Amino acid sequence: MNKKVLSYIIDNNLIKSGDKILVAFSGGPDSLCLLNILQELKNELNIEIGAAHLNHLLRGEDAFKDEEFVINICKEKNIPCYVKRVDINKYSKENKLSSELAGRNVRYDFFDEILKKEGFNKIATAHNANDQAETIIFRLMRGTGLEGLSGIKVSRDNKIIRPILCLSRREVEKYIEEKDLNPRIDKTNFEKIYNRNKIRLDIIPYIQDNFNKDIVKTLNRMSLLIQKDNAFIERFSIKVYNEYCKKDNDSKIFILDKKLFKEDEAIVTRVIRNALTDYSQSHYDFEMKHIYDILELSKKETGKIIDLPKNISVENIYGDIKISSRSKENIIYDKREIAINKKEIGKEKINFSNYEFIMSILNNQSNKSLNLKESNLVKYFDLDKIRENVLFRTRKNGDKIIPLGMRGQKKLKDIFINMKIPKESRDLIPLICFDDEIAWIVGLKISDSFKVTNNSKNILKIVAKRKE
């Protein structure tokens, strides 16, 4: 058995010399088998191992006996042991999660905590070939795609490994008998109130008796074939994801470009899933329903919003899809006003919103020598048309401007809508006013009222530099 597992580890490049591996140890047959095999292969693989046990406080006295068993086994084998107790029922209610999802989240948070604190670099879980078959059937009945049908991966993120995925449950039981090990048995595994248990106890035995006695091997073989096909599609979808997903990590906003939705649906759904996973740092909270909700949202009118798990909000902004947090804590609206007297222009830099402004006066400067279209962040104005003050502020209700080249006023709100400026960005855009009239919507438009003409003698130059 050790040779079979060792070969599987080598073939799948699961373990490297010098690895520190944390075994998820429940005390049951599978995890005891895994712990024992890795302990026996320890010198050959040149690794260190430890064990982590999470007491979910779900099974009364049995849960504490499991915990005691785990601690004693680790003492016997001289293996570092880490134990934590969490009331999963309480946690699931507080976080509005199923008990299964709550348990998984808490377990992996616990494992990651140990990895960071104790220097382990990999987590080994004790999934076996029967677990793989049960998972595939379970997902098939719920409705799934290629990713779901590929089942449990032998490794993930070069951190989570499944060294005994090659062993059937019967092989694990045989190993336990031969080694005279006495694992803890979870009685709930034999209760048919859970769908997974019904698959294990009823459906798979029925298929074995009536259709295919090797159904476990068959499903595992199918899983490997699908994983290869799915990996090819995934590699392509990642290229598309990198092309069409724009990330603003400071504001924690992801934007999926509208061009993405012209790609094949098989690619689009994967890109959406990758974006949600990347944004939330969670592999488990999103279903196909959520992905298709976003797909439908892309066809709706701008401004439509849907809410997803993990406090995520998804909005259609003129065909682009914005993924952000529902919390607005990270958005700071600068409602201050800074007024500079005309006589004080050029004496200091002005810091306002996300910009630094530098103002300078060009006396008796011919406008023919100026590049008036130099940049959206460099603008020139007729200084003599300013009576007293230059004012820096953010927008107010009813704000209007006379855009360059026009005679009549236009509402800022209409300009923002026409230029497809996202709602949450509008309050962050600085306005520069001369006296009481808007002269520049920074980065967007200037006013016709203060434009430089052939008759302009004194010119005000303003340079806006965006802060990093």
Image (cartoon, rainbow, N blue to C red):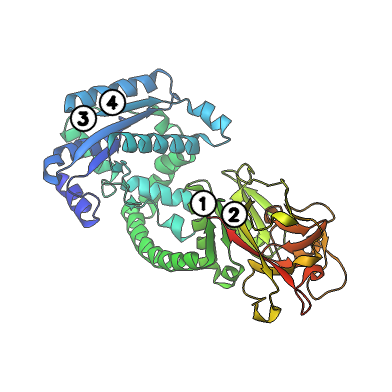
Q: Position of residue 130 (x, y in %)?
A: 34, 46
Q: Position of residue 163 (x, y in %)?
A: 26, 46
Tally of marks: 4
CA gap, disc 3 and disc 1: 37 Å
The answer to whether the residue labelled 2 contacts the one labelled 1, judged by CB atoms less than 8 Å apart, is yes
Q: Label 4 is placed on what type of residue?
A: Val
Callout 3: 10 Å neighbours few (<14), some, many (20+)?
some
CA gap, disc 3 and disc 4: 10 Å
Residue at label 2? Answer: 323
The answer to whether the residue labelled 3 contacts the one labelled 4, judged by CB atoms less than 8 Å apart, is no
On the rendered image, what quadrant is the N terminus found in? top left
State which tag comes first along the sequence, 4 or 1: 4
Callout 2: 10 Å neighbours few (<14), some, many (20+)?
many
Q: Label 3 is placed on what type of residue?
A: Ile
State which tag comes first along the sequence, 3 or 1: 3
Q: Position of residue 122 (x, y in %)?
A: 29, 43
Foreground tag (2 vs 3): 2
Residue at label 3? Answer: 79
Foreground tag (2 vs 4): 2
Q: Label 2 is placed on what type of residue?
A: Ile
